Image (spheres, rainbow, N blue to C red):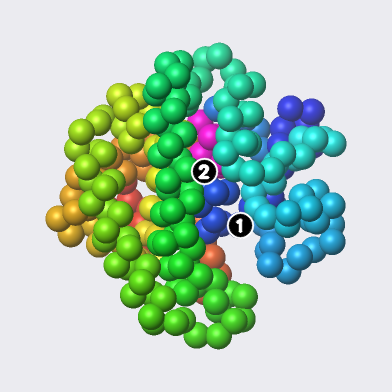
Amino acid sequence: MMENSYILYHYPLSPFCRKVRLVLAEKKFDFVLREERYWERRVAFKKLNPARKVPALRNGVDVFADSQAICEYLEAIAPEDTIPLIPDDPKEQCEMRRLIFFFDEKFNREVTSVLLFERMMRRVQQRGSPDERRVKFGLVNLKNHAKYLKFLVMHRRWIAGNKLSLADFTVAAHLSCLDYVGDIDWNHKDFEEIKGWYSRIKSRRAFKPILSDHVPGYFPPLHYANVDFD
């Protein structure tokens, strides 16, 4: 491995891993992906990250964990010719981090982790059939949270303000996972405004590799990889 390149231990449909991948690509870092089936609890991976969670980012002997900590580290050391993803203004930073926490914690707990587990991860991990009550719970919460996300994109150019930030990559990472398993109805009125914002994110060069992800045995909707959703 080159001195300045990274290994990212990830799982393709983890929103936290996708967020880090977006930042690595946006900031022009050299990196390779190593898929980690974290639920198998490999001893070698535990030595890298005792929490046994993905993502984990390795550069030589240094290992970094927690998606937000990794992203802020990458922002701090990124080349100066890349677009800043953390605002300079303290108030804007606070709003960005508030929204990141909201989506990585509340939205993930009530929507992303529920639907991904029931739609796909149960079978991947050989843990039985989907619990339809949990699926309904996740879909109802998705609709409720979509109203808030719609409000944000209608009143701001980007999620946290007028400039692209880590908040945008955070939300896009979650939505891309949900879109892969077919749980977003982009034609619904609450997603019309969100669709325009998401299309701008999908069109970024950093997003292209994510749209090429494939989980064996599970195929995304036809519109998944298309920037214009056609």
Could you say where residue 9 lies in the image, as x and y percent from the top left? 69, 50
The answer to whether residue 107 is magenta is no
The amino acid sitting under disc 1 is Tyr
Circle 2 sits in a helix, a strand or a loop, which is it? helix
Are there few (<14), some (14-19), or many (20+) residues within 10 Å of tag 2? many
Residue at numbered disc 1:
11
**Which secondary structure, mark 1?**
loop
Q: Which residues are magenta?
A: 19-26
Q: Is residue 23 magenta?
A: yes
Q: Marks 2 and 1: CB-CB under 8 Å? A: no
Q: Is residue 118 visible?
A: yes
In screen coordinates, is 68 left or right of 112? right
The amino acid on which the numbered mark 2 sits, given as a three-letter code, is Lys
Residue 115 at x, y percent in the picture: 43, 68
Rendered location of residue 105, percent (x, y)? 48, 51
Residue 59 lies, with reference to residue 173, above or below; the image says: above
Distance between the Cα atoms at labels 2 and 1? 12 Å
Q: Which residue is mark 2?
A: 19
Taking the spot 55% from the left edge, 85% from the top edge, the residue there is: 128
Magenta stretch, overall SS = helix
| On-image quarter of the N terminus | top right
Instruction: Check the image and report above or below for 180 versus 16.
Output: below
Query: Vertical placement of 20 versus 214: above or below?
Result: above
Q: Which mark is residue 1?
A: none
Is residue 75 shown left or right of residue 56? left
Which residue corresponds to the image point at 57% horizontal and 39% vertical from the top-left?
68
> Foreground residue, 140 or 200?
140
Q: Residues within 10 Å of mark 1 (few under 14, many from 20)?
A: many
